[in-house]
Image: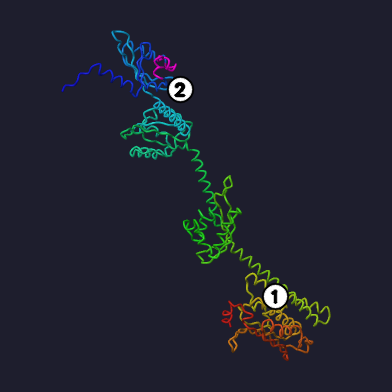
Amino acid sequence: MPLEKPTADRIAPRLAAIFANAAVGLCELDAQGRFLLVNEALCTLLGRTSDVLRTLSVVDVTHPDDLAPSRRMLAAIADDGQTRSLEKRYRRVDGSVVWARSTVTLLEGADGGPGTFLVVTIDLSEQRQAERAREESDRRSNTLIEGIARSTWEADSAGLVVQDSPSWRAQTGQAFEEWIGDGWLDAVHPDDREYARRQWHDALAARRMVNAEFRVRRSTGGYDWMNVRAAPVVDDNGEVRKWVVMDIDISARKSAEAALRASELRLKTLVSGLPQLVWRAVDSGHWTWASPQWQAFTGQTPPRSVGFGWLDAVHPEDREASLGRWVQAQEQGVLEIEHRLRDPHSGRYRWFQSRALPVRRDDGAIVEWLGASTDVDDLRSLHERQALLVAELQHRTRNLLGLVSVISDKTLQGSHDFDDYRARFRDRLGALARVQGLLSRFDEDAVVTLDRLIQEELAAHGIAGDAAHVEVSGPSDIVLRPESLQPLAMAVHELATNAVKYGANGNRGGRLAIHWHLAHASDGVRWLHIRWHESGVDLGAAGGGFSSSGQGRDLIERALPYQLRARTRYTLMPDGVLCEIALPATQVLRDADDAHGERSQ
């Protein structure tokens, strides 16, 4: 069936429906620009009803600044009949402005009369807002880049510079002809140039961003450190169209980093030279770093000491107290601990004093703790020894004062007059002083042998041990206990005093023989035997100096057995005196030297 031939009667209603319901604004203007027909979309766009618009002309709804272009466009269309478009602003009733694109076509008039204009108006509000947002974003980006970057420039897809960058040339002093292509590399420091070239070419090949740091020449001379960042710009097909680059001046940061490295190097050198074990910590004893001294002493590697690994080096009995001090340190603002740390080389623990202070921010918050552990083991030992020495000094002083009192009383009882008392008392005090001198050597970690005690006492009385009439013999390495020195020295003093005044050393022809040795008794106990024998003495001429009583004999026969469990015998012979003293080795000899003394017999 053939298609029905369209007629004006059939088309007109349809065109009218399209006109009325179109989504864009449609209107017909007469030759003077007055509205003849308007659709609903245009009414909505301009904010007016169709009745109102048909009383107005296009001049009444156009922004004043856009009137002239609108009139020129209508005149041109009326003249040549060519369709034209114009982006312009329309004024709404509420005073607001709306951007729109109006496309105008000339319609022929009936019977050759004046033509009218068909206007298609499209709302550009959203497009304009997007453009303004993009422009604002571009402005912000440019402002941000200008605030950050020293210079910006572009390169083509091959990475070659093809257009000018005044900021780059101002920075480097290069002329345009010098820096196009890859001439910008000439402005890079010679030591960094190969690195910069490699970074750039690797990025081009991989089509990835560049983020490199190198030195770029300054137009005024010298070089500045730059962080050079470049990114590819790709099209819809993923092809690189160009590269955009910005250079950020990081000279200040580099100087700060260099200063920090120098400072850390100085600190490391200082810390390495300290005798203390230095460390850093956070969060109640959580270590973050330990110095080489800590590793050298404890044997802990840095990974083992961080966190709470350092506790492994602390004596098990001190660990709980050490952690408790860290809890207190948060409140007190200072850490002080005395604990024992193990030395793996010797296998023993040494006492250390650990002290730390907090590093605080301006607001007072603790950032970290800096601490050091100082070896105080020797100091503690000295304090303990000092306490023992003070106690020993007090003990000795009390004993010495008591002994002086006894000597004074005994001397007074055996003296004929005051002069005799003074002489005897002075001699005995001298002997006592010599004993104290020997005791002081023990305090200096020296030793005193029986041989030395006897020789010094004989010398104090003017008796030469190597004289023809004097014989002194016995092992030279019998080391005496300090508590045995005083009674033995006083006994030898009394014997020597009598020998000088009345005995072998006070008479012509007299002889003195002193001998000592070590021997075991039948019960296996070792004894030190001392034999003092004076002979060739005329007892009658001695004037009664040798007697059956007196302080010397009292000391030998009573004091030595009481103080040293000695066995003594004091015998007056026809031509002199024989004194025999036997002392248990456990009372008079140093334990460590007993065996050595026994072998020397």
The span from disc 2 to disc 1 (Cα, nearest Å) is 120 Å
| Residue 120 coordinates in the image, percent (x, y) | 34, 20
Which SS class for mark 2? loop
Report the amino acid beneath label 1: Val
Q: Residues within 10 Å of mark 2 (few under 14, many from 20)?
A: few
The secondary structure making up most of the magenta span is helix
Q: Residue furthest bottom?
A: 574
Drawn side of residue 366 relative to residue 580, left or right? left
Q: How many numbered dots are placed on residues in this image? A: 2
Residue 180 counted in the magenta span: no
Q: Which residue is mark 1?
A: 435
Report the side of 3 relative to 410 (left or right).
left
Q: Residue at x 39, y 29 (%)?
A: 178
**Magenta segment, which residues?**
49-66
The residue type indicated by label 2 comes to Ser
Percent coordinates x, y for residue 504 in the rendering: 72, 85
Q: Is residue 323 above or below residue 473?
A: above
Q: Quadrant of the N terminus?
A: top left
- Regarding mark 1 in the picture, which secondary structure is present there? helix
Q: In which quarter of the view is residue 379 placed?
A: bottom right
Q: Nearer the viewer, residue 259 or 513?
A: 259
**Nearest the camera: 67 or 307?**
67
Q: Which mark is residue 96?
A: 2
Rendered view: 151 above or below 440: above
Give the residue furthest to the top.
112
